[in-house]
Amino acid sequence: MTTHEGDKLTAGYHLLDPLADVRRPGDADCDVYLTGTVFLDIIFTGLDSAPVRGTESWARGMGSSPGGVANMATALARLGLRTSLAAAFGDDHYGDYCRDALDHGEGIDLTLSRTIPGWHSPVTVSMAYEGERTMVSHGHEAPPPEEPAPSCPPPARAAVASLVPGGGQGWVAEAARRGSRIFADVGWDDTGRWDPADLAELEHCEAFLPNAEEAMRYTRTDCPRAAARALSDLVPLAVVTLGSEGAYAVDGRTGETAEVPAISVEALDPTGAGDVFVAGFVTGTLAGWPLADRLAFAGLTAALSVQEFGGSLSAPGWVEIAAWWQHARAYDDQPARALRRYAFLDRLLPAAARPWPLRRAVPTIGFRQA
């Protein structure tokens, strides 16, 4: 069996379809659609401190993996969702590697993506230390059309949108009009304006999932829970991640709130954890789980991801989730309330073992074949 054949079989070996109970004849082939920029991520770990100007720092660990929007696309696919990604890829070795990893390795549908001759792949170098990370990126906008998203996105159960300060994305409203449930996150506003008007597209969204700092800045509040309540006036479901404290959510339609503490793990690299959280929450929402279960599952998948290098290839699959649950019940390294909070996993998890491990980030993007 060739490497690619093994990767394809691994990607197709879904031990669990979380949407099996809600699938109906005639449903869209795509579960989740998303678009954005794919980076090649190079991650240095094992740094004792931040790099100091004028000195050379040696990292004890290194990994390479697709990054950017690939983080969330991979996390969704590894949870068994049929994922479609529209992105631009360079025609360099980095682009070939990222495309191969997502297509053959993860089973992500790249039909709507394009390869651009003469355009080099964006690159991010991430340095992880003291539980945080510092990133340096380089890249150029892809030649027109600069935004790879089609103006008329494909039919899908859901779509994930990253809101852009200062400008809207036409496809979001169109996707919502066609019946997709829109989940939105947002990036750091480098302008410092944090203008609530930049969240106008929330009118098309079902859920908004910022981190605590982003939520407080947009709502002009000094408490993330107050920020979530304020955001629930703009979007049906406001979810605010609280870092080491877990996550808090408010359902503006029913008034229901939920708060779930974070799982205690030894973090290797936090890159992409927020994307994995969103993927876990989308999965639970589409499957129709209770709000607190969705929060808990999203937090668990994010926590498991920080124990591996990189963003995309650190995302857990169902067997990794099952292994954590088996360990948590056998040992007392998690609080008792965590075991009670995750009891819902008993009715979800597969009993079988996966025949191949998930692909993980490695120090180089490939070796020559012998």
Image (tube, rainbow, N blue to C red):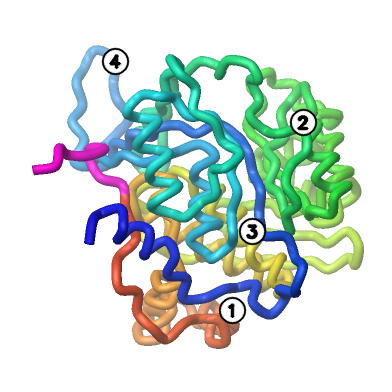
Cα gap from disc 3 to disc 2, whole angstroms: 27 Å
Q: Amino acid at mark 4?
A: Arg
Sequence order check: which comes first, mark 4 or mark 3? Answer: 4
Q: Residues within 10 Å of mark 3 (few under 14, many from 20)?
A: many
Which is closer to the viewer, label 4 or label 2? 2
Question: Residue 301 colored magenta?
Answer: no
For the C terminus, give its image quadrant.
top left
Cα gap from disc 1 to disc 3, whole angstroms: 13 Å
For the N terminus, give its image quadrant.
bottom left
The boundaries of the magenta stretch are: 361-370
Q: Residue at x 73, y 54 (%)?
A: 156
Q: Amino acid at mark 2?
A: Gln
Cα gap from disc 1 to disc 4, whole angstroms: 46 Å
Q: Which residue is mark 2?
A: 169
Q: Which residue is mark 3?
A: 247
Cα gap from disc 2 to disc 1, whole angstroms: 37 Å
Instruction: Report whether residue 230 is seen.
Output: no
Sequence order check: which comes first, mark 2 or mark 1? Answer: 2
Q: Amino acid at mark 1?
A: Arg
Q: Which residue is mark 4?
A: 53
Q: Is residue 190 left or right of residue 205?
A: left
Sequence order check: which comes first, mark 1 or mark 3? Answer: 3
Q: Secondary structure at mark 4?
A: loop
Which is closer to the viewer, label 2 or label 1? 2
Q: Position of residue 342 (x, y in %)?
A: 55, 79
